[in-house]
Amino acid sequence: MPFDATSAALPGVQILGRGDATLGRLMALLDSTRPCALDSEWWAPKLPSGKPDQRQARLLCITLAFGDDDAHPLRPGRAAETWYVSRTMLRVLQIGPWSRGDRKLAGPLYAHALGSDADVLERNGIELPRTNQRCTMTLAWLVGLSDNRGKYGLKGIVEDRLGGLMSHIKESWLDSWEAAVAAEQTEQFRRYACEDAEECLRVAAKAEQMVAAEDEKFQRWVTGVEMPFVHALRRMQGRGLKVDVEHLGRLREELAKEIEEVEAAWSWEWPRVSISSPVQVAKEFYGSAWDARMATKVGKNGLPSCDAESVRRQAARLPEDSAGGKAARLLLRHAELTTARGTFVEPLLALATHHCGRVFGRYLQHGTGTGRLSSAEPNLQNIPVRTELGKRIRAAFVAEPGEVVLAADYSQIELRVLAHFCRTGKLVEAYQRGEDIHSRTMALLGIDRPRAKIVNFLRIYGGGPKRFAQQGGCDVPEARRIMRLYDREYPEVGRVMEAAVSAARRNGRVKTWSGRFRAMPGIDAEDRGEKAAAERRAGNTAIQGSASDLVKLALLAADQAGLPIDAQVHDELRLCCPAEEAEVHGERLKAIMEAVAPDFRVPLVAEVHSGPTWADCK
């Protein structure tokens, strides 16, 4: 039978029963200033990828863990009282205290996956109170409270950082809805669910302690931006993207045909070498047609790498009609086509079919070191932007009839961030005057535009003369000469990058414009390669991390202004709207994006485009 307060066997855990006494006690706790941690357990059918489809989640239970009466609101500590609300009693919350989002709690409300929990609860008729909601996973990411693998899952943090030991969920519990309902009746399941809320409170205590140790600027960013951003992200995910399934089907067939053609051309030239075997390719070409010194690394098998960058370097230096050049170009084309089909087209087609023509991606706020969003199912961040194949994939993302896709993209945001940090100098002057920075660099260094773009961005990513030579199609001495000229004309750029490295050595971390920080392990390493990588990462984090701060602010401001943002990819925000409203929406979005940093020393510029498909917005 469904368990209640009279059948529970969990010491220290209160069970929400059918009587007024238990409900009254829970209401009193919710009205108190005691910090509360929430966890939800749910079941959902599987997506084509095998992951649960959260949009169809069915709630099994929620657990609430409350801190001590005298706990500091932002240092909650261990759970003093834990409540379990079973599936059979969820109706009490649906029609009572949490049926409306206007109820406010006096204390903070924590959840480790706040966005996911809030989404599932809303889909099951329970809206979280409008209170001081804090996502402990995001807090942990912001202060570097990760497990031993650099991940931010609750179990890993508790066991690796807090010395705890948590129960494991049984996969069989979630085989079906019937299995999940049966599991919810067991003490083992209930203990697992209660532990999640209790340990969330412990993680919150540690994370809040670490936040409180930082300066006020960082604390304001956490509370004013990162926490509300959790819900902006959730709303964006919920809108989804309309996909042209017929276009994807045709594209899949076209890619299959193109892959066959590439494989046939390869087999004609090298019948004994598999195009899909890096070992066979390395043995065939390195030492003869290819220069092993240009490989990015040597594998465990002792062979030079055949990764995309290594092959790209060979293609750049060899004539198209040479054996080595032809092989490199066929390999690159084959990799591009198979990646497009396996990573984008087929997963998109499966997801769009599952959701009747729409895809609902997952965005991770804590997915990268710099602070940029990462995404999955589908991975929108990795769709090529400037290639012909990337445009064919983007053309599958369409608007509803009568609507258009509208996208606004920051112009050269990373270079503008770099200019802001430079304070003075030619880079700042160029942007303040509205000049094209690549044209300015062309004139100053006496080089063509492609090389000007390369050298401008290489300084951000920490590339040296060897990388410039590979990308710019020149020898290393010429690349070194150009980069020395650049440093002479833009000395302020070198000072900014050196300052980031110095800060990393001094503090073990680098801060972004917002006050966020990233630890820099290896900055004082004895190994030259490890140290150089950490130095590049330090400079890159200062610039790219600050750029991601600005994009995050723009998305949050657009969401708060009521604009229906449905995707954020790199420096671009997109939405769909009626065609007749495109100009108005475009002007609003552009104004928001350009106004997020009024203290910037150079203007931020957003460029807006619209069209029937996403491909038309570039």
Image (cartoon, rainbow, N blue to C red):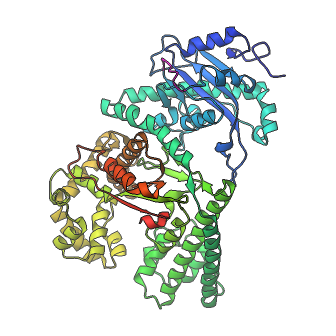
Asked if residue 106 lies in the magenta stretch, the reply is yes
Q: Nearer the viewer, residue 501 or 303?
A: 501
Location of residue 583 in the rendering, given as x and y in whole percent from the top left corner: 37, 56
The span shown in magenta is 101-107
Please tell me whether residue 553 is drawn above or below residue 390 in the rendered image.
above
Location of residue 441 in the rendering, given as x and y in whole percent from the top left corner: 21, 68
Task: Answer with the quarter of the image where residue 251 lies.
Answer: bottom right
**Type of secondary structure dominating the magenta stretch:** loop
Tell me, yes or no, if residue 524 can be seen here.
no
Who's the residue at 41% across and 39% down the image?
A: 560
Q: Nearer the viewer, residue 439 or 422?
A: 439
Location of residue 578 in the rendering, given as x and y in whole percent from the top left corner: 47, 55
Please tell me whether residue 180 is drawn above or below residue 83 in the rendered image.
below
Q: Which image quarter holds the N terminus?
A: top right
Who's the residue at 79% across and 26% down the image?
A: 185
Location of residue 66 in the rendering, given as x and y in whole percent from the top left corner: 57, 18
Who's the residue at 69% across and 9% down the image?
A: 20
Seen from this angle, which residue lies furthest front?
Answer: 580
Asked if residue 351 lies in the magenta stretch, the reply is no
Please tell me whether residue 282 is drawn above or below residue 59 in the rendered image.
below
Tell me, yes or no, if residue 24 can be seen here.
yes
Q: Which image quarter holds the C terminus?
A: bottom left
Task: Answer with the quarter of the image where residue 83 lies.
Answer: top right
Please tell me whether residue 526 is drawn above or below residue 446 in the rendered image.
above
Q: Nearer the viewer, residue 11 or 561?
A: 561
Q: Is residue 442 left or right of residue 107?
A: left
